[in-house]
Amino acid sequence: MNVKRYENNPIITVDDVKPSREGWKVDYVLKRLFLLAAFALPSLAGASELYVSPSGNDANAGTLDAPLYTVQAAVDRMQAGGTCLIRGGTYREAVLIKASGKEGQPLRLQAFPVVNGLKKRP
């Protein structure tokens, strides 16, 4: 570290500061945790919404880009506070809801939002 004086105020030049080996490890771990949070947490947060489409597949994750095929598959995966967004189409199935919501966290089945004929991405 290089300390210089400028009008009686010490100045530390950053170029001269070298991180310790432990600092590098901490920095590496923090960057990895940030990446994990940036990519994993949004998918976990989105898990409360499941999408169903006649062009979907029940093996899919139930996301907007990979919707489920049946409402029953979505209902089976739903947890308290979850929402099933059903895309336009014909669904010929009987749905048995086995799970239940909690107070303030009901299960929701609703149509996928459409605005002026254009699909609105939530």
Image (spheres, rainbow, N blue to C red):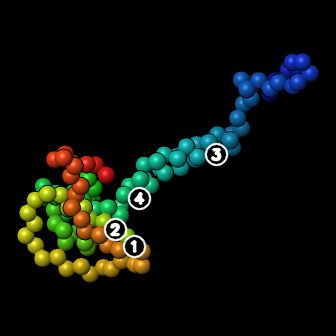
Question: Which residue is depicted at the point 18% across and 58% down?
Answer: 87
Q: Disc 1 or 2, which lies upstream in sequence?
A: 2
Quarter residue 91 falls in = bottom left
Tell which tag, 3 or 4, sits nearer the viewer: 4
Residue 107 x/y as whole percent: 32, 73
CB atoms of marks 3 and 4 within 8 Å: no
Residue 38 x/y as whole percent: 46, 48
Tell which tag, 3 or 1, sits nearer the viewer: 1
Provide the residue designation for mark 2: 82
Q: What residue type is labelled 4?
A: Ala
Provide the residue designation for mark 4: 45
In the picture, measured across the screen, residue 49 lies left or right of residue 12, that is left
Q: Disc 2 or 3, which lies upstream in sequence?
A: 3
**Alpha carbon distance from label 4 to label 2:** 11 Å
**As drawn, 85 above or below 97:** above
**Alpha carbon distance from label 3 to label 4:** 27 Å
Q: Disc 4 or 2, which lies upstream in sequence?
A: 4
Provide the residue designation for mark 3: 26
Q: Which amino acid does label 2 sit on?
A: Gly
**Alpha carbon distance from label 2 to label 3:** 37 Å
Q: Residues within 10 Å of mark 4 (few under 14, many from 20)?
A: few
Residue 54 x/y as whole percent: 12, 58
The reply to whether residue 68 is visible in this rendering is: no
The reply to whether residue 115 is visible in this rendering is: yes
Secondary structure at numbered mark 2 = loop
Q: What residue type is labelled 3?
A: Val
